Image (cartoon, rainbow, N blue to C red):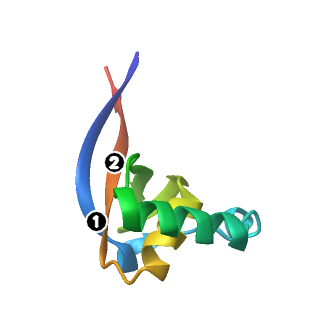
Amino acid sequence: MVERTMESVEIPIAEIYVPAKRKRTLKPAQVDELAESIMEEGLKLPISVRQGNGRFVLIEGLHRLEACRALGEETIKSIIVRARQH
């Protein structure tokens, strides 16, 4: 049985790798909209990452990540998704 565990932490944005195929889905207008919302209300939903090859790999939250990067944030609230074998 595989059990998923999740933990929310602040991760340095510079340590998050975005796969090339995911980067192609980036919509600049959506990043601008999110950046404005984050400035006013803060980041409501953490991004999801997994650990792989000594770095964090983005699973979900490309536009939130890029909006925080555009705002000059150094860290982002993230959920680290891990799969555990039982």
Q: Provide the residue designation for mark 2.
A: 80
Task: Give the vertical position of 38 relative to 32 (above or below).
Answer: above
Disc 2 residue crowd, few under 14, some 14–19, many 20+, Cα 10 Å? many
Q: Is residue 17 visible?
A: no
Task: Give the vertical position of 21 relative to 73 (above or below).
Answer: above
Find the residue positioned furthest to the top: 1
Pointers 1 and 2 in contact (CB under 8 A)?
A: yes
Q: Nearer the viewer, residue 61 or 19?
A: 61
* Disc assigned to residue 65: none
Q: Measuring 38% from the left and 62% from the top, which residue is drawn there? A: 40
Q: Quadrant of residue 15?
A: bottom left
**Image position, residue 67 (x, y; %):** 51, 70
Q: Measuring 60% from the left and 64% from the top, which residue is drawn there? A: 33
**Image position, residue 49 (x, y; %):** 43, 53
Q: Nearer the viewer, residue 30 or 65?
A: 30
Q: Measuring 28% from the left and 65% from the top, which residue is drawn there? A: 11
Q: Secondary structure at mark 1?
A: strand
Kind of residue sitting beneath label 2? Ile
Q: CA distance from mark 1 to mark 2?
A: 9 Å
Find the residue positioned furthest to the front: 40
Q: Is residue 51 visible?
A: yes
| Quarter of the image that includes the C terminus | top left
Kind of residue sitting beneath label 1? Ile
**Image position, residue 61 (x, y; %):** 53, 54
Q: Measuring 45% from the left and 78% from the top, which residue is drawn there? A: 69
Q: Quadrant of residue 4?
A: top left
Left or right: 32 in relation to 25 = left
